[in-house]
Amino acid sequence: MPTATSPTVHYFGENHARLVRTIRYASLAFVIMATAASASTWELPNIIIIYSDDLGYGDLSSYNSKAAYKTPRLDRMAAEGIRFTDAHSPSTICSPSRYGLYSGQLVCRTGRRTTAFEGPGGPSYIKPGELTIADMLKERGYRTGVFGKWHVGLTWYDQAGKRLGGGFKNALLIDYEKSTPLEDGPNTRGFDESFITPNCPTTDPLYIYIENGMVATPASQRHKRNTLPNPGGKWRWDNDEGWMAPDYRFMDADLLFYDKTLEYITAHRKNFPEKPFFVVFSTQISHAPVLPAPEFNGQSGGGPRGDFIHELDVLTGRLLDAIDKLGIDDNTLVLFNSDNGPETMHTVWMRQDHDHDAAGGYRGMKRDGWEGGHRVPFIARWPGRIPQGQVSNQVTSTTDIFATLASVVGYKLPDEAAVDSFDMLPAMLGIQDDKNPIRPHLLTQSFRGEFQLRKGNWKYLNHMGSGGNNYSRDNLVKYALPETAPDATGQLFNLAKDSGETTNLFFTHSEKRREMQALLKKLTPRKNGRSASKNRQPIRIDSSSAKD
């Protein structure tokens, strides 16, 4: 019988010497070792990222015991791996956060303003030659794919060869022959295969599909929102009437993206069985408008938006079942994350109609610099590698996925790449005590590009107010809180004592405020700014220590 031994984990990073030790997990030994014959080799895992949209901290039942519905497959995924309770999106809106996923960097590093692209908006936030997460994994032998919402900007040209700006009217000016194959689409940013929408799939025109940089059916038909169902009389909100391809699908968008993801994985296993794959399943759930596919209507008990998130839960389960059926479950790392907090009206309506707090008890929502705008679910599952049942309070960001995967595959990141990315693999493997933070600090950006800074339990916002939503509006005024330091120019909170960010300590803790302001200035210069340390080294997992 094999002994209860896990692989030896070597970590050669700054301030991590104390982590170098052998960790033994009795219940994991039989999975980790596989066979004595293969124990001396390290096989690169397949990697799947399920990237949800506008899903708040309180939108999964594993994060919110009072949720108006259940998310059993995502809860099970968390139970079979690790669930982070202090995870954050790099921005409080989608396009900058997606840039953070693909680049490992805050959007301020681009020198451009924070924006959510609409129409033929662009160019891409990802500059030519900038290392992406897909580039990095391709260098390690992966085939790469992305399916669903892209939304980091694309370049389109008119008939005269002039680059088009955003806006719905400009959609009719696109010369598709001059514009495609797209010069800054996924296939020029590290992805071998892609099937994407340029913007939010059911909110922001262009409503077209782009497959491997090409557009089979241009936008030529005017979309009318009254052609779509409107469950509950309001949930069709934020569906813009721009231009669409005649074959465009609104009601089952995520079923289409799921099918494309599964087709890619299945074809990869058939045609490239010797190579690992990396795929991003980029959903539009739970972005407005709320349009669950017909088979999910009325299934959650939590109204239309509950049904929408139920659909996401079911699709996650289907994907996990599929990789199990393909025989690759044990060697597939699956990550689940969201691009920012819950949409404003969704948060209001779910509280009113279903006593459901999509922000999970935190102040703020999408666009806001308060916690509800950027604290999001983050789950990782990798059977036999990530111990089951872990709940971590390590502070982490979506940008950290880049350095974490680099560590998984043994890739040393150059200093100029992924400058806001920290390696969370020690936490995932269970070899990092939560009392020893991996991140010394965390930067986020709100809707207007303003910064929020975490250091331990302290949080500093370099702005007054939400940084996003207007809480004097009719729908939000009920959530407005009195300003306890009206003459301040920023906000300082101790989240350990005030997780609701109610009492501004800007004046009463001036020494801490000056410390945070100085750190913020250090981390955010326009030129050569960074928050991650230099000379990052990947973990090396050596399975040769497994014993018979």
Image (cartoon, grey):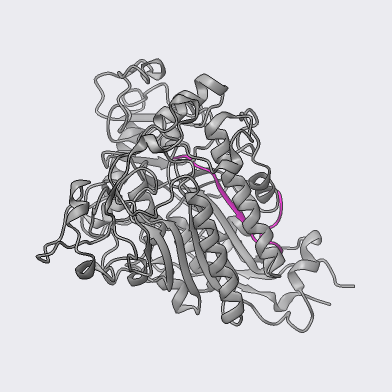
Q: Is residue 386 magenta?
A: yes
Residue 273: % across, % down: 61, 80
**Closer to us: 146 or 8:** 146
Viewer can see residue 24: yes
Boundaries of the magenta span: 374-390
How many numbered tags mark residues here?
Answer: 0
Q: Is residue 218 rendered to the left or right of residue 429?
A: left
Q: Which of the 4 image quadrants contains residue 386?
A: bottom right
Q: Is residue 97 rendered to the left or right of residue 360?
A: left
Q: Which of the 4 image quadrants contains residue 208?
A: bottom left
Viewer can see residue 431: no
Relative to 432, does residue 4 appear above or below in the rendering?
Answer: below
Residue 310: % across, % down: 60, 41
Q: What residue is shown at x 42% (from left), y 47% (from top)?
A: 441
Q: Quadrant of the N terminus?
A: bottom right
Residue 204: % across, % down: 32, 45
**Main secondary-structure element of the magenta-colored stretch:** loop
Q: What residue is shown at x 57% (from left), y 46% (from top)?
A: 312
Relative to 4, does residue 84 appear above or below in the rendering?
Answer: above
